[in-house]
Amino acid sequence: MNRPVVVGVDGSPPSLVAAEHAAQAATLRSRPLHLVHGYLHPLGYGVPLNPYDVGVPAPTEQAQKMVAQAAAELADRWPGLTVEARQVAGGPGAALVEESRRAELVVVGSRGLGGFAGLLLGSVGAQVAAHAHCPVLVVRPAEQPLPVEGPVLVGVDGSESAELAVGYAADEATRRGTPVVLVHVRPSDEERRVPDEVAETRAADQAESVELLATAGAAVRGSHPGLAVEERVLRAAKPEQALIEASGDASLVVVGTRGRGGFTGMLLGSVSQALVQHAHCPVLVAHPYGHAR
């Protein structure tokens, strides 16, 4: 099955930037690109808001022109890329989640039309990032150009979700021809002198971090021969702080859906949510294919 790369477009600058990233991702994967415009209000989720109105409105001519123009421009800028565009009767978030069932990758912008200034990731992007059935690329910040340099960064914590993220990160780094950087974050050391037993505990923690990274690094080197792999132990009060700062030098950050200590009812763990909202480069949320919620 030749799964496409799917991107939601609504005519807003963030969605058009997301479409450019999606074209790059489709080209790297040798996959077709599908532009999707969900043309009902997000709260409607494809169902008429008036229960007595059983008809579904037809797509507007203006929206049709918008998606057709976006498709034509992308096909012109990315020779050889197959681009399809269509409108779907459904809320943008629900439409993209449904499309993700058959997609290789779904790409969303940081905020589309109707977004609030204080919301770094719009409701559509947040819904897709949490509920998709395939990996999701969240493109932010929108004002920056397509990343062409910098490693692919991924956090390692020993969880099953992080293990999947490491595999996706290695795949992405191989496609891009960049190194992959495996990062494990430990709590910060206090500046004051500490008792010997505390120092011993910290030494043991450091050794555990090194071993965790070495195991992940060995797996990546075995599955991706020739890929440059770097292993880093970082210290910070919170893992998200260190990863957000490290993302400033990366072309992509890959996160799992939930790490160690995550709550069962939480679709995205706190670290993943923080990176999706605040990273300095695009973020790939590593949903497994066929993921259902």
Image (spheres, rainbow, N blue to C red):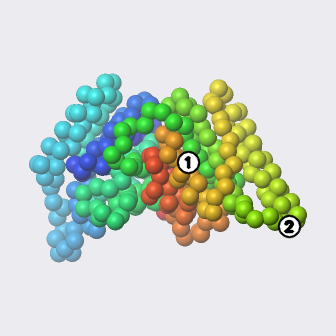
Inspect this view and state whether residue 287 appears: no
Residue 174 sits in which quadrant?
top right
Nearest to the observer: residue 107 or residue 237: 237
For the point 40% across and 57% down, the residue is 128
Circle 1 residue: 246
- Quick one: which residue is furthest to the right in this view? 196
Residue 270 drawn at (x, y percent): 54, 64
Q: Nearer the viewer, residue 81 or 216?
A: 216
* Nearer to me, 180 or 67: 180
Outermost left residue: 61
Any mark on residue 195, and which?
Answer: 2
Q: Tell me: 176 left or right of 190.
A: left
| Picture layout, residue 182 above or below residue 74 | below
Assess disc 2: are there few (<14), some (14-19) or many (≥20) residues with their C-alpha within 10 Å of its C-alpha.
few
The quadrant of the picture occupied by the N terminus is top left
Residue for point 50% across, 55% down: 275
Amino acid type at circle 1 is Ala
Residue 223 found in image quarter = top right
Q: From the viewer's perspective, tell me whether residue 259 is left or right of residue 2.
A: right
- The type of residue carrying mark 2 is Pro
Rate crowding at label 1 as few (under 14), some (14 to 19) or many (20 or more) other CA atoms within 10 Å. Answer: some
Task: Judge left or right: residue 224 versus residue 107.
Answer: right
Give the structural element (helix, strand or loop) at label 1. Answer: helix
Residue 14, disc: none
Mark in front: 2 vs 1: 2
Percent coordinates x, y for residue 233 in the rendering: 69, 49
Give whichever of 216, 3 is nearer the camera: 216
Kindly indicate whether the residue at mark 1 contacts the one at mark 2 (C-beta within 8 angstroms): no
The residue shown at (48%, 33%) is 149
